[in-house]
């Protein structure tokens, strides 16, 4: 489920974007406000997570910790334990604290996804703007290569690259993901850029004799920033899910680092045993992705759809 | 003018396919290890590796290898997989792909037939009554589905329908002679999972696009003139939203063909995506190349069809600036 | 009871027919009904065999490189198919004793350089035609042909020639003594196929013939009505497939979609039994461990390896990760499953972080990277536990998780620290030799010890039981202190099946009792 909606985004933005820069205030709905609160919450966790975590993410808890006073059980169960005073959210499949792993995992999961999405934007927007302001041949060349990249299922693409690099570390994971998602960003950036390039105010600027750099920084970038921000949110969500899928196929981060996707995967056997262990990290993923989506909804309502918006409220 | 636009799109599609073939060839040659050595494994000696390299044409210049491969592919010869090669034969890839393509096509068509009408209808319904409880239910549940990992959805469905209730088989075990209800029951689990996943995407996009069109000045004008909302949506908004919706559907279908690795893995469904994963793991380059070419070709064709639909449904786009 | 087991073995070998077996049991005073249950395995007491029905077997790995060619076999699914479709010259019993199969009998000369095999008469191939010496020579020559892709080619490095003396006699000449040759012939790769054909549909003599085959999907098999021995062949049909994802495999059994699943996680045993399905747990010498290459840092430092040995919480690994379905390892491969050759006198090493810290400090190493693939059920968990325990004593072990695919070619015997698994071999000597013979092909810690080499040879020739045991003890001590092996645990062979299926053997050499279940099991109607 990744770049399925790319070309739609393009068409959407086509409709969304008026010829002059929109100057609307972003009005937040209730879901949007909750979304922002949750995103802020996770951002704080990214910073302080490891500090407030009860255990280290790698700690396999001692069996003694789980001894119930008065019981003669010397080696109590440590795996897939329900929430208790020892493990607030329960324990995982080899007896690690789920809460600690979620707290540590926030940094890994969100960090990787944000960096990969930023990288995708860096490559995609640069190439997209270059295609929209550059020569026809540059545009054609970039667009065809981009179409080709888009046509390869992204998960397959990642699989081949990761196999080629023999299970590299986080750095390469970010690089590969960023590169794959750059293709869909390129499409949007290019079409948004082209729209601006043919607008009256850019024509005017050209007539005034402004340079290309001036047009890019003063006209194009400000005008495409808002729709791109909307898209950034969606892309970020897809990257999180994409990396989870890679984890599912055994190609995620290296142990003992925890990321939420591989936590769901590694604890999946718990479901059939009646443990909620895989649902905890899944809930963390969902809380973040849903929040971002809710914010995105508000953003896109602010950039377009004025009447639709009025009819809803 | 329409014809010229279509021809241009066709040309673009062909060029894209060619670029894809180059990228795939370079990409698969990046994979570490000498294919001949991987095939021979622990038993590789310099002599037998050399013999096998020659047999596989690996001793030629990469450009020559590419040209040979491309002309073969163009003529429908996708090459020989290393499967069975130890016995001196190898297996023609076309033979290996046959049943996998059938399986993938069957699932894709079924998912499409079920998911497309339902989700377009639900998306329209939500767009017709924005802000109502119905709209909010649809929006919220689709939002949830697209926000959690697909393998979790699949596993939960298995636990409910196969393990707890015992209604459906948890994996797809095709005997090859199923039809009708038996077939539907056999593939019900992946079918259900994929319908849920695809529908969520299509519903959200349908709703968003229709609402978007609703905010355009001419619809705004119609609303101010007092034309009933239902009439606006069905007469104007839907027609103008066809382009983006068809696009989403095309992308979803392409995803069903090549991107459903996780779902095929969980349900042990013998489709193309699973074959490609196995091929990557075995370093079976000709097979990886063949699968990748199929995925890309399907994508290019579907996008071409979607673009045609867009051009034909939207006069504005028939004359690009 | 010993008698019964002997008869059971004779029956499994085809030396007794079912009727003969039942009458022998009658002579021992066992009722016909009870005798029926003893037909295939002492573990099958609940049900009497009945003909009919079919099973679906789900293995763990498969793909487009699934092979029907026995010499190429590398995975459980390949071995299972080989045992279903073909026979070997010699087979191995549950107690590791050797028994005739397609070879009615065999002789060996004094220095173990010449073998003579008498081939069974009247054995028919699936595609027609009688098995003769020619077919045996053809099958065996495939392993030694130049450029042969055989996965056990190295087993036959000493072979000069296989020669047909007459229609039913085959002579094997070796250029160096090899007393283990009969054991090597029990491998699933050493099955006999029809000469000069690559048509696997017709090339076997085994209990079931093949009806359809799709690599990476499944194969279907039906009873061979012309089978040369009477072992039951209770099932009408067998379907062999694989489900790669372990959760999906378990769910498939729980949902009743398949009848047999291989390689289950010990933690799920409770859930499987609760659902009414049966777990087949066979104590075995199968183990998972960590190879520290002795020819390179950090494994070249004896203190480093010793430190890693002391940091293994073996008891917890067996208790928690294996749920008691295994035995603690003592850093050498020969556990109790090898019977008399296991050195029980050797003290068991225990978890001792202080000693571990002492040795690691002495080595001056405080950081290392280990390559880990899920090559055997518990190994990933055990490595994570080691990593966590090392962290407590200030040692930073990095783990690089890699997929199993390509692991044996790209990582094993290459990276300084890597995990490994070895199946149990029929004898302690063959196990030690394959892994620790100086300069051996699969000496995977690159530990070349002359004394070890001498002991391996002399113990093979030693006839005095006590002296032999002493030699084995010395070898086990050498491996557990001097080599680069760290072996925290041995695991039972764990499989699960539908409760309606009975008759599995207890052979510890492979999944579901050595992968050779097809002709023996039956399913309640």
Image (cartoon, rainbow, N blue to C red):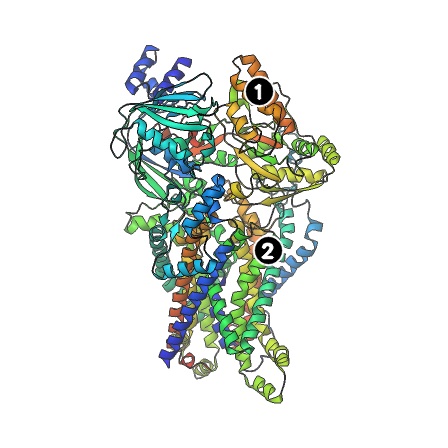
Residue shown at the point (61%, 38%) measured from the top left: C383
Residue shown at the point (32%, 13%) measured from the top left: C24
- The residue labelled by disc 2 is A172
- The residue labelled by disc 1 is C472
Chain of the residue where label 1 is placed in the rendered structure? C
Q: Nearer the viewer, residue B41 or A273?
A: B41
Q: For residue B219, which quarter of the picture?
A: bottom left
Give neighbour class at mark 2: few <14, some 14-19, many 20+ (Cα, 10 Å): some
Q: Nearer the viewer, residue B228 or C330?
A: C330
Mark 2–mark 1 Cα distance, whole angstroms, equals 48 Å
Chain of the residue where label 2 is placed in the rendered structure? A
Residue A39, numbered circle: none
In the image, residue A147 lies at what x, y percent?
47, 67
In the shown orientation, is residue C166 left or right of residue C497?
left
Give neighbour class at mark 1: few <14, some 14-19, many 20+ (Cα, 10 Å): many
Using the rendered image, report if marks 2 and 1 lie on a common chain: no
**Up-down relation of residue C485 to residue A221 (above or below):** above
């Amino acid at each position: 489920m990744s770049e399925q909606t790319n070309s739609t985004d393009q068409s959407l933005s086509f409709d969304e974007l008026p010829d002059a820069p929109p100057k609307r205030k972003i009005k937040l709905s209730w879901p949007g406000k909750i979304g922002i609160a949750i995103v802020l919450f996770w951002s704080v966790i990214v910073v302080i997570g490891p500090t407030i975590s009860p255990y280290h993410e790698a700690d396999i808890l001692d069996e003694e910790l789980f001894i119930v006073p008065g019981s003669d059980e010397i080696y109590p169960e440590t795996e897939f334990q329900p929430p208790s005073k020892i493990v607030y959210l329960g324990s995982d499949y080899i007896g690690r604290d789920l809460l600690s792993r979620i707290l540590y995992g926030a940094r890994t999961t969100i960090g990787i996804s944000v960096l990969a999405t930023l990288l995708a934007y860096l490559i995609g927007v640069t190439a997209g703007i270059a295609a929209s302001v550059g020569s026809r041949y540059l545009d054609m060349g970039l667009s065809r290569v981009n179409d080709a990249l888009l046509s390869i299922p992204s998960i397959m693409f990642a699989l081949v690259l990761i196999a080629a690099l023999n299970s590299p570390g986080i750095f390469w994971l970010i690089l590969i993901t960023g590169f794959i998602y750059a293709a869909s960003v390129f499409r949007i950036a290019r079409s948004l850029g082209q729209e601006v390039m043919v607008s009256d105010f850019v024509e005017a600027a050209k007539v005034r004799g402004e340079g290309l750099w001036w047009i890019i920084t003063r006209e194009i970038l400000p005008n495409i920033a808002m729709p791109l921000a909307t898209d950034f949110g969606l892309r970020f969500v897809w990257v999180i899910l994409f990396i989870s899928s890679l984890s599912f196929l055994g190609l995620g981060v290296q142990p003992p680092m925890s990321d939420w996707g591989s936590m769901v995967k590694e604890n999946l056997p718990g479901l059939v045993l009646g443990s909620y262990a895989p649902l905890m990290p899944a809930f963390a993923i969902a809380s973040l992705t849903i929040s971002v989506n809710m914010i995105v909804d508000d953003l896109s309502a602010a950039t377009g759809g004025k009447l639709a918006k009025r009819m809803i409220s | 003018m329409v014809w010229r636009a279509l021809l241009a799109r066709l040309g673009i599609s062909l060029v894209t396919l060619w670029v894809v073939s180059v990228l795939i060839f370079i990409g698969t040659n990046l994979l570490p290890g000498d294919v001949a050595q991987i095939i021979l494994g622990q038993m590789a000696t310099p002599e037998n590796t050399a013999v096998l390299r020659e047999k596989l044409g690996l001793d030629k210049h990469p450009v020559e290898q590419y040209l040979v491969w491309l002309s073969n592919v163009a003529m429908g010869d996708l090459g020989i997989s290393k499967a069975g090669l130890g016995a001196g034969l190898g297996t023609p890839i076309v033979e290996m792909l046959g049943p996998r393509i059938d399986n993938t096509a069957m699932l894709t068509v079924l998912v499409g037939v079920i998911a497309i009408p339902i989700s377009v209808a639900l998306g329209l319904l939500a767009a017709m009554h924005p802000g109502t409880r119905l709209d909010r239910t649809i929006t919220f549940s689709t939002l949830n589905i697209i926000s959690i990992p697909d393998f979790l959805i699949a596993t939960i469905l298995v636990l409910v329908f196969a393990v707890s209730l015992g209604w459906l088989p948890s994996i797809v075990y095709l005997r090859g002679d199923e039809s009708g209800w038996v077939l539907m029951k056999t593939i019900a689990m992946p079918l259900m999972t994929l319908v849920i996943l695809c529908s969520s995407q299509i519903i959200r996009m349908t709703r968003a696009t229709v609402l978007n069109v609703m905010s355009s000045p001419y619809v705004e004008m119609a609303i101010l003139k007092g034309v009933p909302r239902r009439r606006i949506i069905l007469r104007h908004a839907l027609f103008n939203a066809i382009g983006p919706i068809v696009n989403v559907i095309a992308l979803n279908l392409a995803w069903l063909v090549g991107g459903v690795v996780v779902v095929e893995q969980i349900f042990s469904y013998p489709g193309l995506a699973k074959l490609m994963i196995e091929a990557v793991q075995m370093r079976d380059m000709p097979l990886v190349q063949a699968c990748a070419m199929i995925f890309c070709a399907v994508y290019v064709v579907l996008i071409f069809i979607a673009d045609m639909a867009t051009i034909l449904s939207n006069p504005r786009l028939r004359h690009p600036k | 009871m010993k008698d019964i087991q002997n008869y059971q073995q004779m029956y499994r070998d085809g030396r007794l027919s079912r009727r003969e077996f039942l009458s022998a049991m009658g002579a021992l005073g066992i009722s016909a009904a009870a005798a029926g249950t003893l037909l295939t395995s002492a573990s099958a007491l609940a049900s009497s065999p009945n003909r009919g029905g079919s099973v679906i077997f789900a293995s763990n790995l498969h793909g487009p490189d699934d092979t029907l060619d026995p010499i190429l076999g590398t995975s459980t699914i390949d071995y299972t198919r080989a045992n279903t479709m073909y026979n070997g010259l010699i087979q191995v019993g549950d107690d590791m004793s050797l028994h005739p199969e397609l070879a009615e009998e065999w002789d060996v000369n004094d220095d173990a350089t010449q073998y003579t095999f008498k081939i069974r008469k009247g054995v028919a191939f699936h595609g027609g035609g009688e098995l003769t010496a020619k077919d045996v020579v053809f099958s065996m020559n495939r392993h030694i042909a130049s450029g042969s892709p055989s996965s056990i080619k190295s087993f036959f490095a000493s072979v000069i020639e296989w020669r047909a003396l007459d229609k039913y006699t085959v002579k094997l000449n070796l250029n160096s003594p090899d007393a283990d040759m009969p054991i090597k012939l029990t491998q699933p790769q050493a099955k006999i196929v029809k000469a000069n054909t690559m048509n696997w549909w017709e090339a076997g003599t085994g209990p079931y013939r093949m009806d359809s085959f799709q690599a990476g999907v499944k194969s279907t098999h039906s009873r061979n009505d012309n089978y040369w021995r009477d072992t039951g062949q209770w099932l009408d049909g067998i379907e062999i497939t694989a489900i790669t994802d372990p959760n999906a495999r378990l769910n498939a059994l729980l949902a009743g979609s398949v009848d047999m699943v291989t390689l289950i996680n010990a933690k799920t045993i409770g859930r499987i039994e609760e659902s009414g399905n049966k777990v087949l747990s066979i104590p075995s010498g199968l183990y998972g461990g960590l190879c520290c290459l002795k020819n390179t840092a950090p494994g070249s430092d004896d203190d480093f390896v010793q430190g890693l040995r002391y940091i293994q919480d073996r008891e917890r690994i067996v208790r928690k990760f294996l749920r008691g379905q295994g035995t603690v390892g003592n850093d050498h491969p020969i556990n109790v499953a090898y019977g008399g050759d296991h050195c029980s006198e050797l003290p068991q090493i225990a978890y001792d972080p202080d000693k571990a810290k002492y040795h690691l400090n002495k080595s001056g190493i405080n950081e290392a990277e280990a390559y880990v693939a899920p090559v055997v059920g518990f190994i990933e968990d055990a490595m994570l536990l080691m990593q966590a325990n090392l962290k407590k004593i200030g040692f930073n072990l990095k783990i690089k998780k890699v997929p199993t695919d390509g692991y044996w070619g790209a990582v094993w015997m290459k990276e300084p620290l890597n995990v490994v698994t070895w199946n149990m071999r029929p004898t302690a000597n063959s196990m030690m030799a394959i892994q620790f013979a100086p300069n051996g092909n699969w000496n995977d810690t690159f530990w070349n010890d002359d004394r070890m080499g001498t002991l391996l040879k002399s113990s093979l020739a030693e006839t005095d039981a006590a002296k032999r045991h002493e030699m084995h003890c010395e070898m086990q001590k050498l491996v557990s202190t001097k080599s680069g092996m760290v072996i925290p645990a041995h695991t039972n062979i764990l499989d699960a099946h539908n409760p309606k299926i009975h008759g599995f053997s207890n052979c510890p050499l492979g999944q579901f009792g050595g992968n050779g279940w097809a002709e023996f099991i039956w399913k309640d109607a």
